Amino acid sequence: MLTALRQGHVASLRVTVACARSLEDVPHDVYLLDLTPAGDARDGGGRFDEVSLLEGLEPVLDAVGGPPSWVVDVARSHRSDRGGLGEAHLSIRLAVDEDAPGAQPVTDLTRAVQAAFATVARTSRAAGGALSRDDAISGALAAVAHAFPDVDPDDLSLTDEEHHEAEGRWSVGLAQLGATRFQVQLGFVQNVPASAHVHRMPLGEVVDSVGP
């Protein structure tokens, strides 16, 4: 156990990109990426390079158009009983179409985020195998709970599911009775099962599960 305070390597990293009409609004789309930073440390962790991660995500800002409003939050924690090995979370919140009329559909940033996440994922160790059905459903519930902390996963019911085996992707529909629907794409970044896209929508909205 460490006897001095220090920040060691990072064993796990979650990257979140949340898109809303304004920085104060509830997001309509949240993108999640879980990584294990690559490294040769004996403790199994890797170096947390905040600068390179942000550089890899910057193309998403270009896709927003105009000077975007954004918030970046970076957090990390380390434990002495794990040799200083830690966990990190990098979160970006974007205001999309902030000045557009409310009835205008928001700009879809899925492809831009998908490409940025693919770039960032190259700095990580190889991803695990394909998701099973149980993994996909539990992963979808966990993704909604992380993206929308006010939503209790126990209040969500499964509405639909589809396995796109050739792409290694699952589409899972969840609904909060009388309130909101969520369409979750697990593995929306190719060859990265630990990537998810959560789309929040009114109960009456129809969504295409074919993918971005």
Image (cartoon, helix red, strand yellow):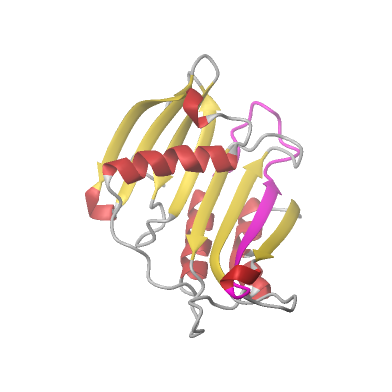
Which one is in front, 185 or 103? 185
Q: Quadrant of residue 105?
A: top right
Q: Which residues are magenta?
A: 83-109
| Residue shown at the point (23%, 50%) measured from the top left | 165
Prevailing SS of the magenta stretch: loop
| Camera-side residue of 119 and 14 | 14
Q: Position of residue 160 (x, y in %)?
A: 33, 29
**x, y percent for residue 126:** 38, 71
Decide if residue 2 is on the left or right side of residue 170: right
Q: Quadrant of the N terminus?
A: bottom right
Q: Is residue 208 visible?
A: no
Image quadrant assignment for residue 194: bottom left
Q: Verify whether residue 6 appears in magenta.
A: no
At a point 63% along the width and 31% down the height, the residue shown is: 150
Residue 59 position, x and y percent, is: 60, 63
Say how many tags the image has. Answer: 0
Q: Residue furthest top?
A: 178
Q: Is residue 107 highlighted in magenta?
A: yes
Q: Nearer the viewer, residue 101 or 181?
A: 181
Whether residue 77 is visible to the viewer of this picture, yes or no, is yes
Residue situated in front as seen by the camera: 57 or 124: 124
Residue under the point 50% across and 49% down: 110
x then y, percent, for residue 200: 54, 32
Task: Say above or below: 197 vs 105.
Answer: below
**Which residue is at a point 23% across and 53% down the rendered structure image?**
166
Side (left or right) of 102 relative to 42: right
